[in-house]
Amino acid sequence: MQNQSLILDHVSHRFGNLLAVDDVTLSVEPGEIVCLVGPSGCGKSTLLRVAAGLEALQQGRVSIGDEIMADGAVTVPPEQRNVGLVFQDYALFPHLSVRDNIAFGLRDISAAEKRQRTDQALERTGLARWADTFPHELSGGQQQRVALARAIAPRPRVVLLDEPFSGLDAELRHQVRDGAAAILRETGVATLMVTHDSEEAMYMADRIAVMREGSLRQLGSPDDIYLHPADAFVAAFFGDVNRFRGTVSGAGVETPLGRVDTNGVADGTEVEVLLRPEALILADSDGTAATVESARFVGRTSLIDVSIGDGAAISVRIRVPGRQLPAPGTRVFVRRNDDQAFIFTPSVPK
Ligand code: ATP
């Protein structure tokens, strides 16, 4: 029964008049991690809860492998879906040891098998030496791993995680999510994980599902989503963008940073051109002349804001590697890397 796919088919969900999930179709293959991302309130948790059966299905179908979990006729209760759940608050039982927390969900198996599965989950999550301690004696990262161990111990067909790392500080978060991703891949289970953190999704996911206002805007590999965003919303969700508007003429559009090709877009179409700050290059010559307004070192990169043109100058942001801090007022030239120039018809009226 193990290692089956999770299939959400035309799922919609309302709270009163609010359409929280709007006709979402999505499947997660065995061994695959799909991250659901999107701004607060876009319906990620609701979709996950519908998949788990914690929210009664209103429209569509939820299946695991060939088995229907919920549709108009069938509803399998959450505890019979063989789904492992991990939430932001680990919801561990404070009066039970780590071992007993993990063993808690193991039912209908012999004591020997229970012990063996618990030991295996402890081993996999690196918790063996904490087996007899209690949750309050553990760090946040360790507690999170207990929650993961508890979810995988029953050998679920699907694991659903809702913001599992958001209670952890940055450093621990990186460590714990690396470990969690490795464990989930190793078990070969289909994993659907909610996060609002686009970088976390890029890092962990085999595929990312981007939601906005209840609907699925794009489903693809991290590369696809970052390099070929379906719309301006997706492009901007995965990082800063410089936005310009213009009208297509002769297969191109004029921007403050020069003419950009618009292959295939009809002449006369109003378009929005999005350029990522890291797709712009600061040069000493050749390119669009600009003046540095400000520059900040933000760790691995520096952000440089420049203005182009006189009078009502246009401001453009450039991201460069390392620490590069030209003084305000420095004259520079800006060049583009058009691999990351995105052309869309505007989503917001002028
Ligand atoms: P966040 O990242 O902030 O957790 P989300 O993308 O997970 O947000 P949901 O929690 O799925 O979003 O909520 C989607 C919409 O449904 C929101 O507008 C929310 O206010 C609404 N909503 C969620 N649960 C309920 C509920 N039980 N009753 C009424 N409205 C709800």
Image (cartoon, rainbow, N blue to C red):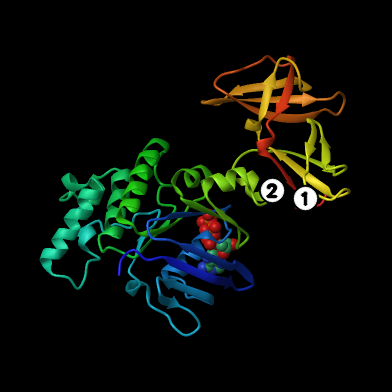
Classify 184 as above or below 254: below
- Corner quadrant of residue 190: bottom left
x, y percent for residue 342? 70, 43
Q: Is residue 96 left or right of residue 189?
A: left
What's the residue at 50%, 44% (across, down)?
A: 202
167 or 324: nearer the viewer = 324
Q: Is residue 166 left or right of residue 330?
A: left
Q: Is residue 327 left or right of residue 150?
A: right
- Ligand 1 lies in quarter: bottom right
What's the residue at 69%, 18% (across, down)?
A: 283
The kind of residue on which mark 2 rests is Ala
**Count of numbered circles on the image:** 2
Image disc number at residue 232? 2
Q: Which residue is mark 1?
A: 346
Classify 319 as above or below 99: above
What's the residue at 61%, 62% (across, down)?
A: 215
Classify 319 as above or below 71: above
Secondary structure at numbered mark 1: loop
The kind of residue on which mark 1 rests is Pro
- In the rendered image, the residue lying farthest to the left is 112
285 or 322: nearer the viewer = 285
Crowding at mark 1 (Cα within 10 Å: few <14, some 14-19, many 20+): some
1 and 2 marks in contact (CB < 8 Å): yes
x, y percent for residue 33? 43, 54
What's the residue at 52%, 50% (across, down)?
A: 221
Crowding at mark 2 (Cα within 10 Å: few <14, some 14-19, many 20+): many
Q: Is mark 2 within 8 Å of ligand 1?
A: no
Q: Earlier in the sequence, mark 1 or mark 2?
A: 2
